[in-house]
Image (cartoon, rainbow, N blue to C red):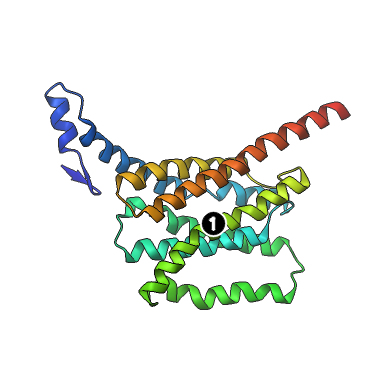
Amino acid sequence: MEFLGMDFRCAIGSLRDGQFPEKDCLLPLISKLLGYCIVAASTTVKLPQILKILKHRSVAGLSLVGFELEVVGYTIALAYCLHNGLPFSAYGELAFLLIQAIILVAIIYYFSQPIPAVTWIRPLIYCAVAPTVLAGQIDPVLFEALYASQHAIFLFARIPQILKNFSNKSTGQLSFLTCLMNFAGSMVRVFTSMQEKAPTSVIMGSAIGVMAHGTILSQILIYQKQEAKKEKKEK
């Protein structure tokens, strides 16, 4: 009995015999289920952030460069997984995250007017290069180099936001729910990538995501508590 690449025969057979499924039978199944859960959750993971910006009509405290680098990182990661034949459950969320990240950057641009003309060079370069990367029409060695660099890209995408939060002693319009889902997704993705026997570089990317998202999440918790205390004192 198979469904979406998940083999339930082993688990069902053990349960029929009144036994708990063996570790080697259960872990791959859990990995697949969690993988598809991440893909499903990823369809709305950035929605709270988008809605928060639209509600307040403000992008205060948000790092534009950080969100732009996110788009670049998702593009490279998605292209690499597509052209290395990884199962959809191991990378499917990247497609939905990329779409939402592009929408998010567009909204930040809109509420950041006026934007210097030189800033528009970045999205123009992306629009020119991204289709080639996603189509895999680049040298395999360069492709590997790009994928290796995307870990650094994701890390540097978080650093400007982390530094901005630290400098402002506030997380501005950052969405707690989006950051929480990003952190949880990265945690689960480490497990599923290991179970799917993904390349070490893929696992490392997820681990970096755990650390970066965890740092931002902790900043939101710390600074929101500080802001709440200040409000109480003022009252």
Residue drawn where x is 44% and y is 56% of the image: 94
Looking at the image, the residue that sits furthest to the top is 18
* Residue 155 coordinates in the image, percent (x, y): 56, 54
Looking at the image, the residue that sits furthest to the right is 234
Residue drawn where x is 35% and y is 44% of the image: 192
Residue drawn where x is 47% and y is 45% of the image: 186
Front-most of 171 and 195?
Answer: 195
Mark 1 closeness class: few <14, some 14–19, many ≥20 residues within 10 Å: many
Q: Can residue 198 be seen in this view?
A: yes
Relative to 164, say whether 115 is above or below: below
* Residue 223 coordinates in the image, percent (x, y): 72, 37
Name the side, left or right, on which 53 lies relative to 24.
right
In which quarter of the view is residue 124 placed? bottom right
Residue under pointer 1: 154
* Residue 133 coordinates in the image, percent (x, y): 43, 72
In which quarter of the view is residue 32 placed? top left
Residue drawn where x is 42% and y is 41% of the image: 188
Badge 1 marks a residue whose secondary structure is helix
Q: Is residue 235 visible?
A: no
Image quadrant containing the C terminus: top right
* Residue 215 coordinates in the image, percent (x, y): 61, 42
The three-letter code of the residue at mark 1 reads: Phe
Image quadrant containing the N terminus: top left
Front-most of 80 and 124?
Answer: 80
Count all numbered tags in the image, as a single digit. 1
Relative to 80, say whether 29 is above or below: above
Name the side, left or right, on which 208 lies relative to 226.
left
Name the side, left or right, on which 232 lies relative to 3.
right
